[in-house]
Image (spheres, rainbow, N blue to C red):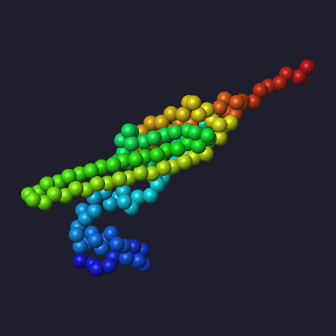
Amino acid sequence: MTLVKTTNGLYPTFHSMLDDFWGTNWLPMRERVNSTVPAVNIHEDENGYKIEVAAPGYEKSDFSVTIENEMLTIAVEKKEEKQEEKGQVTRKEFAYSSFTRRFNIPQELVDAEKVEAHYDKGILTLTIPKREEVKPKPARMIEIH
């Protein structure tokens, strides 16, 4: 057993020391305790935008996606409670995780009424179409008289 573990050779990590002492199951859902706001990918093409949010471990019902005053808000709230009974000892563990991401969506560029959301295999995908008037138009030949 190592008393002090280091990451990149400089600083001890508290969780590693506890893992060595009590094993890796000392804190339920410790991955979520250490987590930050999920990463996103944003793609743009001539038809619109696609936002992908990496959020594994959630259900569709955990998400709330709203658009208000040019602000797209993606929020998650998840509560879990586990109860284990062994003889006379009872252990309850709860976990609460949440995050909120906000994106400025200019209404003159996008059609907020046609935004679609899909959650599959840990990825929340939002499709945000551009308004027809801002989409690139093909070159038009003008006849010379």
> Left or right of 30: which side holds 46?
right
Residue at the far top in the pictured view = 145
Q: Can residue 102 be seen in the rendering of this structure?
A: yes
- In this view, 48 is above or below 30: above
Q: Is residue 145 above or below residue 21?
A: above
Query: Relative to residue 40, is residue 87 depicted above or below?
Result: below
Question: Residue 12: where, in percent of width, then height?
Answer: 37, 76
Residue 120 can be seen in this image: no
Write the residue at 41% across / 58% down: 35
Q: Which residue is rendered at x = 60% and y = 36% of the image?
A: 48
Q: Residue at x 69, y 34 (%)?
A: 134
Name which residue lies at 31% across and 71% down: 16
The quadrant where residue 145 appears = top right
Q: Residue 15 location in percent, x, y?
A: 33, 69
Q: Quadrant of the N terminus?
A: bottom left
Q: Position of residue 51 (x, y in %)?
A: 52, 43
How many numbered circles are shown? 0
Name the residue at the left extreme.
Answer: 87
Residue 49 image-quadrant placement:
top right
Residue 44 position within the rendered picture, expressed as x and y whole percent measured from the top left:
60, 42
